Image: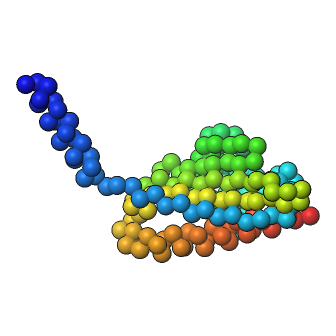
Amino acid sequence: MLLKTTAIALAALGLSAGLARAADFVTVPLEVVVNAPADKAWPKINGYCQIGGWFKTTCEITSGKDHEMGAIRVIAGRVTELLVASTAWSYSYSQPKSPIDYHGTVEIRPVDKGHSKLLYTLVYDADALPKHEAEDKAKDKDNRTKQFTVLINAMKAAAEAK
């Protein structure tokens, strides 16, 4: 009898968990060819707080150091991001207090002797957007795509600068 009661309770728990809000993760993959080799381009754009200049706003590292795991940057005095991964030619960050489970990765890849590919990938839960934004998830994704296309193009220009 105890086994049957436990099985019923677990089944009910599973059903109620299924009724909870399901995540709707959206990926915004951006990439651009850089007219410079990766080993020359990456040092020009890999600073964790350089994003402030590209967005024409402020960026301050408030904890840790540039390139250090766990470093925290604050963009425009209001967006807090945590450095969660780093390789020789990439870094990833999260917004730990974000209700939309927001993450981003910046990466450069060698293409050939004189070119590389810059990738900027965003991932977030569109289902957790505020109601007024969630009503048009496609518009929200389009706005983010436009905003970060401007950013990746600014990064490209910096990477190609002599």
Q: Is residue 29 shown to the viewer in this render?
A: yes
Q: Residue at x 51, y 69 (%)?
A: 141
Q: Is residue 58 left or right of residue 15?
A: right
Q: Is residue 80 shown to the viewer in this render?
A: no
Q: Quadrant of the C terminus?
A: bottom right
Q: Is residue 32 left or right of residue 148?
A: right
Q: Could you tell me residue 29's position as x and y percent? A: 61, 62
Q: Quadrant of residue 9?
A: top left
Q: Residue at x 7, y 25 (%)?
A: 1
11 vs 133, nearest the viewer: 11
38 vs 7, nearest the viewer: 7
Q: Is residue 57 left or right of residue 162?
A: left
| Location of residue 149 with respect to 117 vertically, above or below | below
Q: Could you tell me residue 20's position as x and y percent? A: 28, 52
Q: Residue furthest right?
A: 162
Q: Could you tell me residue 5's position as x and y percent? A: 11, 30
Q: Is residue 51 left or right of residue 97?
A: right
Q: Residue at x 53, y 73 (%)?
A: 142
Q: Quadrant of residue 146?
A: bottom right
4 vs 81, nearest the viewer: 4
| Location of residue 78 with respect to 140 vertically, above or below | above
Q: Could you tell me residue 76's position as x and y percent? A: 61, 62
Q: Residue at x 85, y 50 (%)?
A: 39
